[in-house]
Each structure stands twice: as C-alpha cells, then as structure tokens.
C-alpha cells in the first residue's frame, strides 16, 4: 500500500489521481489532500478518502472548510505554503504528488525531497523555476522524481530502451493548441473561451492557455532539460496535432523510440504512482487503424514566440526561466480576466526577461526574488495596457 500526499487534489490532475486511487484501493492510500479554494470538492474528497491531514491555500476559507468536515478534522487543517509543506513531509507519506498549478508548487516539492519523499510531478513550474536546485536535491537525498506530464512520462519510458550515453535527441511533441492553423493577425482578437478550447486534452485553465501560446511546450523543454539532464540543443519540438505520439527519443544508431497512447492523463499518472509496474486501467485501447493519419510539422516560432523565448531563457540560464515562468503566470491570469489580449501574454514575458538581471539559479532566495520581480513588472505592464 503506497501512502500518498496529494497537493492540488481538486484540479484536473488531482481529480485524475484520485480516479486512479479509487480504482486501486488496495494499492494506494491517501494520507493528505490540499486544494487552493474549492472547499466543496475538497470536503467531498476528504469524506471519501479519509486523509489524516488537509490543507487549503486560502486562509480565509478555513472556517467554512471546517464546517463541511467532521469535527475530528478541526485540528488537522493546515494553511497555505506552510500547510502544503507540512503535508509534503509527513512521516507516513511515501510519495508526494504535486498537482498544484504554478510557482506555489516549488517550496512543497523542495520540502518533500529534503524529507526523503518520492515525487510524482505534474507541476512543471517547479522544474522551470528551479530545475538545477531540485535535481541536485533529488540526487543528494536519493529520492525518485517521476514525471506525470504526458510528454515527460513518454520520454521517461522511451529512455528505458537504451543507455543515456547513446541518446542523440529528445523529440517533444506539441498538439499546436487551438490556434495551430490561425494567422498571426487573427490571434490579436481571440478571447479566453477560444483559447481554453484545447483540441485533445481537458485540463486546467492555466495550462490550457499555455498550450494555446505554446508556452506550455517551452516550459516542457525546460522541464525535460532538467529531468533528463540533457543539453537543450538536443531537445526538439515537433507539432503533432493528434496527441497520440506523446514524445520520442532518438538513439545514436538512428533508432527512434516513441510512446503512444490515447490522450488520457490517468495513464502517465498511474505509471508514476506504480512505477515500474503497469496497472490495467480498463481504458479504451489505442486503435491505430481508427486514429487515422498521424501528422508532424515544425513549430512556427514567429506566430508562437513563447517557445523561442523559453529556449532563450534556458540559454541565458540562472534565474531567467523563473522570470519567464512568473511573468507568464501573471499575464495568463490577466488574459483570463479579460484585462489583456492574447498576444500581450508573450509580449509581457519578453519585457520582464529584458528588464531583470540574471542571478544564481542555485540560490533559492535568488529564484524567489526573480519570481517576485517578474510578477511586479508583469503587473506594471498589465496596468499600462
Ligand atoms: N491538466 C493536465 O492534463 C496537465 C497538467 N499538468 C500540470 O499539472 C499542474 C496542475 O494542472 P491542472 O490540474 O490542469 O490545474 P488545475 O487548475 O485544474 O488545478 C490546480 C490545482 O491546484 C490547486 N491549488 C492552487 N493553489 C493552491 C494552493 N496554494 N495550495 C494547494 N492547492 C492549490 C487548485 O485548487 P482549487 O481548484 O481548489 O483552487 C487545484 O486543485 C500544472 O502545473 C500543469 O502544468 C501537466 C500535464 C497535464
Ligand atoms: C497532457 C499534457 O501533458 C499537456 O501538457 C499537453 O501536452 C498539452 O498539450 P500541448 O501539446 O498542446 O501543449
Ligand atoms: Mn504535457
């Protein structure tokens, strides 16, 4: 029985994690659950899974959450980052599943690693902000960091086919998002509902917008660089509109190993939870004859500059990926709130990257300061729009 602490249980990934746990009650036990503000769903989950501890991001919601839970939880509700860190380090927990969105995932993940916990990582922002710091900690503390992001799960699986020194290239697939075929001019006027309509995946709002700008793929390039300790020059992005081939690894003999499957996050989630075993999830099988043509095309960095900017941030190194991430988070939120247009998202990120001096990526304090600075610049830009 694997004891899990699930951070971000009310989100798209969080609910899929619980679907897997629900399906395999003899294998997984939920010790802790956290959410940001959806207290109704969190309370339902607590009643169903009976965790020992609960945390909520918004402190104002503690009394209302307590009302919805049995009295025995009164002294077992934690709050905010401190609460998530507490849940991530509980002695009974074996694996922490980080399914929160955004920079809020960084400190709990770091705390979990320092406490010797394995991590199932959906929260890619953790590695974007602090990839070197996190991977250093992973190696120092001898924990496993298992990817949940579908492309990284695919690469992780394809890497099992060969030796690391024989890898020639990693090929990350991108759906291209809802605007893959749109002209640049048309992108200026798109609204949140259009941008949220991902062609293949049902996901949270922030990652859906990131997919539409292709920033998601940029964040994933950075995530792959750290997760697999690979030179960014060897990471290529290919647009694959069907999202059936989840990513590929090319070896030096020219062999290319891919992982394919229907687009369902329960597959990479279950693999991370049960690694190296595979679970029969009872899902529809991939039918190659029914899924039709599988297409591949190069990404258009002119229409979707976010991907180019993510590579640039990686090349600049230091705290620049943290700047990219933070400015993007603020800009995406502003877009979703109707305060800025779609194409302003990447323009704001570019401004933040141009203004902030780079700093040491191994200093947590420098990363947090870069994050704050980028948020201030992005807010200033939004206000001046
Ligand atoms: N969705 C997907 O298919 C995929 C997602 N990912 C990554 O996984 C992460 C989660 O994405 P997704 O599930 O789509 O996002 P959602 O927006 O659907 O969910 C985010 C979760 O984080 C919770 N949360 C926010 N702030 C806090 C906080 N301070 N403390 C605790 N919980 C908090 C939210 O709670 P509440 O809703 O209660 O506010 C919610 O449970 C992201 O980093 C994303 O990039 C990666 C690959 C695929
Ligand atoms: C399911 C998953 O892993 C997402 O990150 C997905 O890949 C987003 O699709 P895009 O390829 O459009 O960014
Ligand atoms: Mn992905």
Image (spheres, rainbow, N blue to C red):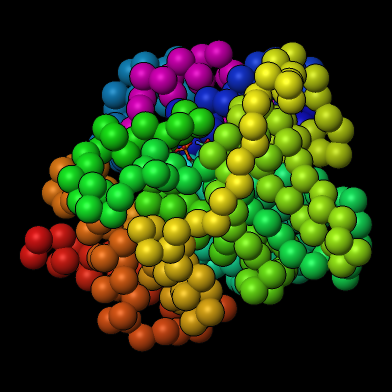
Is 346 left or right of 41, judged from the image as shown?
A: left
Residue located 66% across and 42% down the image: 246
**Depth check, front residue: 64 or 42:** 42
Range shown magenta: 29-50
Q: Position of residue 13 (x, y in %)?
A: 53, 33
Quarter of the rendering occupied by the C terminus: bottom left
Residue 88 visible in this rendered orientation of the protein: no
Would you identify the image quadrant in which residue 87 lies? top right
- In front: 52, or 342? 342
15 horizontally vs 95: left or right? left
Can residue 156 be seen in this snapshot? yes
Residue 256 higher or lower than 94, as above or below: below
Query: Taking 270 as reference, is 164 left or right?
Result: right
- Name above or below for residue 213 compared with residue 382: above
Residue depicted at 31% across the width and 71% down the height: 350
Residue 53 figure quarter: top right
The answer to whether 175 is drawn above or below residue 282 in the figure is below
Residue at 65% x, 24% y is 291
In this figure, what is the number of numbered marks?
A: 0
The percent position of residue 52, horizontal first and vertical second, equals 58, 28
* Residue 215 position within the rendered picture, expressed as x and y whole percent measured from the top left: 43, 56
Q: Is residue 257 magenta?
A: no
Tell me the quarter of the image containing the N terminus.
top right
Residue 200 position within the rendered picture, expressed as x and y whole percent measured from the top left? 51, 31
What's the residue at 29%, 27% (across, down)? 63
Determine the residue located farthest toward the left in the rendered image: 384
Would residue 41 be counted in the magenta stretch? yes
């Amino acid at each position: 029985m694997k004891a899990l602490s699930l951070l971000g249980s009310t989100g798209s990934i969080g609910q899929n994690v619980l679907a897997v746990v629900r399906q395999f009650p003899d294998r997984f036990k939920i010790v802790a659950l956290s959410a940001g503000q959806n207290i109704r769903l969190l309370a339902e989950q607590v009643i169903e899974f009976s965790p020992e501890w609960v945390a909520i991001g918004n402190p104002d919601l503690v009394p209302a959450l307590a009302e919805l839970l049995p009295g025995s939880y009164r002294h077992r509700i934690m709050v905010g980052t401190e609460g998530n860190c507490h849940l991530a380090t509980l002695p009974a927990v074996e694996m922490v599943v980080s399914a929160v969105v955004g920079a809020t995932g960084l400190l709990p993940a770091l705390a979990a690693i320092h406490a010797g916990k394995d991590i199932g990582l959906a929260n890619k922002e953790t590695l974007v902000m602090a990839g070197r710091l996190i991977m250093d900690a992973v190696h120092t503390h001898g924990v496993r960091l298992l990817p949940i992001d579908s492309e990284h799960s695919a690469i992780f699986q394809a890497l099992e086919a060969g030796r690391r020194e024989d890898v020639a290239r990693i090929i990350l697939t991108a759906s291209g998002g809802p605007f893959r075929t749109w002209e640049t001019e048309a992108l200026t006027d798109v609204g949140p509902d259009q941008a949220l309509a991902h062609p293949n995946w049902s996901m949270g709002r922030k990652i859906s917008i990131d997919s539409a700008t292709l920033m998601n793929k940029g964040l994933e390039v950075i995530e792959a660089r750290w997760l697999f300790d690979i030179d960014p020059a060897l990471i290529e992005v290919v647009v694959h509109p069907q999202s059936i081939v989840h990513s590929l690894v090319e070896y030096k003999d020219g062999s290319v190993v891919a992982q394919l499957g229907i687009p369902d996050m329960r597959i990479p989630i279950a693999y991370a939870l049960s690694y190296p075993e595979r679970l029969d999830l009872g899902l529809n099988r991939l039918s190659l004859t029914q899924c039709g043509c599988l297409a591949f095309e190069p990404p258009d960095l002119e229409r979707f500059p976010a991907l180019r900017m993510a590579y640039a941030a990686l090349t600049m190194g230091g705290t620049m990926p943290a700047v990219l991430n933070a400015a993007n988070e603020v800009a995406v939120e502003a877009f979703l709130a109707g305060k800025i247009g779609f194409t302003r998202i990447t323009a704001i990120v570019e401004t933040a990257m141009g203004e902030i001096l780079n700093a040491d990526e191994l200093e947590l304090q420098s990363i947090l300061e870069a994050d704050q600075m980028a948020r201030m610049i992005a807010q200033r830009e939004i206000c001046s729009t």
